[in-house]
Image (cartoon, rainbow, N blue to C red):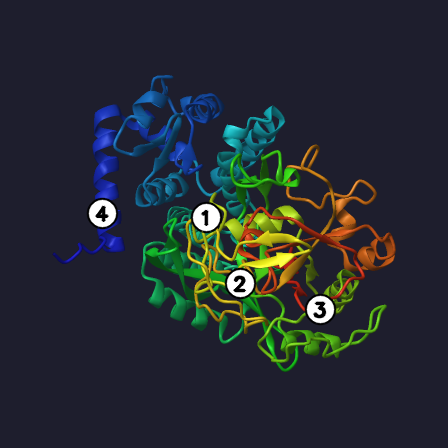
Amino acid sequence: MTPLSPPAEDTKITIARETIERFAQKFGLAHLYFAYHAAFPLAITPHLAYQIWAKFQQDIHKNSLNIPWVAVADLLLSPLCDAVETELYEMDLAVRTVLLNELKLDPNFGQNRLKELSDFLLTCVHKQRLSKNPSLSDVTELYEWIAFAYSNEPHKAAQKIISTLQVQDWQNPFELVRLSSIIATFDQPFAESQEIKPLLTYGKIMGKYGRGDKAVAVKDFAKLGKGKQEIKIAGIRLQIPQFFPFETVTVNPQGEIIHREHKEAQYLTENIGKTTLEMVYIPGGTFTMGSPEGESEYDDEKPQHQVTIKPFLMGKNPVTQAQWEAVANLPKIQDDLDPNPSDFKGENRPVEQVSWYDTLEFCARLSQKTGKNYRLPSEAEWEYACRAGTTTPFHFGETITTDLANYQGTDWDYEGKPYSGSYGQSPKGIYRQETTPVGSFQVANGFGLYDMHGNVWEWCADPWHDNYEGAPTDGSVWDENNNDNHYQSYIDLLVNIKNNNRTRLLRGGSWYFNAALCRAAYRFINSPDYRDRFIGFRVVCSGAWLP
């Protein structure tokens, strides 16, 4: 069956006019005047509707039209509004457009009434923020956008919308469509400014992507950016989304692949000389950190606790030798870097033989080069990114195999203690005895990250703690002697953190160790000046969208 095409714009307007005429015929001119005013906020609660009624009914009464309080219920329950959730209603975009145009054309109100409505809405925003009601936060934000857009400050509305777009999760199609629809409501105030007008185009393309027309959307974004990775709107840089396809797999307890899924991830490409650095967008969210009862004998992985993570960018792969060399050749900040420290040579292999201190200098040079804030991940950020929404020991599922990751898949003995080459019910595998080029196994986790299990251990920012008692729940670096701001700034890292010599966390396992140590929850430790053939790192970037 061929899907139905959406109605043309002029058809939508015609239908909207007919709906409004039937409403006016049923309830009268006073109700229609109230609908003019109630159309302004786009999303409306009964409480706000009553506030609008109280604010403007006396003014309308001057025209010998009395608006009864029951007009609020009549409007919200009419075909002009749709209930989207408890105590929240929205008007169809075409209906709202017609009502606002009639408001401006009516001799009793005119263009100035939009300014009065803007001022009224900003007052409501202020009162709702003082109430600190979290259930109203999204609606309050929308009210503020609308108020600024139709006042003399449309640039402020655009800047606030862009701030939301900068951290948008492109794997949430419903939110993409919702934001696209909201941006479309600002067609009139934004279209009048050549500086803001591209935001309307951005919103339309975002809607296409959210509705599944991804190939067309990617091409349209490329046209909008004119070959660049960002555009400037209202004085703020907005990234042009880039996407790459990837595949994830799920295995059963025996290590057999039982499901494959093809997905797309948003990423940012950073040019760093002769090579590039691909940074994947990691959406914010809440997850359970640590291992559950029965998974591990290690007390340092407990207690499990909830952590809420803000969005950030993370390297698609561990830092490669080519990327390391490019940054090592940038101007020195404080310490020298060996441009070619690795034992297992190869441009696309992960860099190894780098200390925690070395990574600080790397991040400092990279930050200075790009103007963005590159750093090591916090331990919580790393585990959240590794799990990518899963709760199993590995993002693949209950177990892992050497067909999916590079670790020691044969039995071995370390300091008199035997270690198995398998995990759970999975078969034993092979022992490659060296690193592999990043992405060799061609399967990623749900966020689009490769090699999160095995290959090389990855440095994290945090100093070691024996367990999670008292651990932060906001994803920040856990360091009692230095606040998280120091870890967000490469200058503070180099000056204030460098010489405290506390042991540091590593995550992810490596080619040298067995499967159990590759689990998402496993914690490894070493001194910050330690280097070895099985230790590397990957970088994260926060605030990357800011000017």
**Pointer 4 and pointer 3: residues touching (CB < 8 Å)?**
no
Q: Residue at x 77, y 43 (%)?
A: 479
Q: Can residue 154 be seen?
A: no
- Mark 4 or 2: in front is 2
Q: Amino acid at mark 4?
A: Thr
**Residue 515 x/y as whole percent:** 53, 55
Residue closest to the eye, 503 or 88: 503
- 443 left or right, relative to 385: left
Please tell me which residue lies in front, 417 or 323.
417
Residues tagged 1 and 2 counted as in contact (Cβ below 8 A):
no
Sequence-earlier tag: 4 or 1: 4
Q: Residue at x 44, y 40 (%)?
A: 110
Q: Secondary structure at mark 2?
A: loop
Kind of residue at badge 2: Asp
Q: Which residue is mark 4?
A: 14
State the separation of the CA atoms marked 3 and 1.
41 Å
Please determine whether, in this image, residue 419 is positioned above or below residue 217.
above
Assign a secondary structure to mark 3: helix
Question: Based on the displayed image, in which of its 4 quarters is residue 129 positioned?
Answer: top right
- Return the residue at label 3: 366
User: Is any part of residue 482 visible from this angle?
Assistant: yes
Q: Please name the residue that numbered disc 2 is placed on.
A: 451
Label ID, residue 326: none
Give the CA distance from mark 3 to mark 2: 22 Å
- Residue 207: percent from the left, percent from the top? 37, 55
First reached walking from the N terminus: tag 1 or tag 2: 1
Residue 49: x %, y % from top left? 42, 26
Q: Nearer the viewer, mark 1 or mark 2?
A: 1
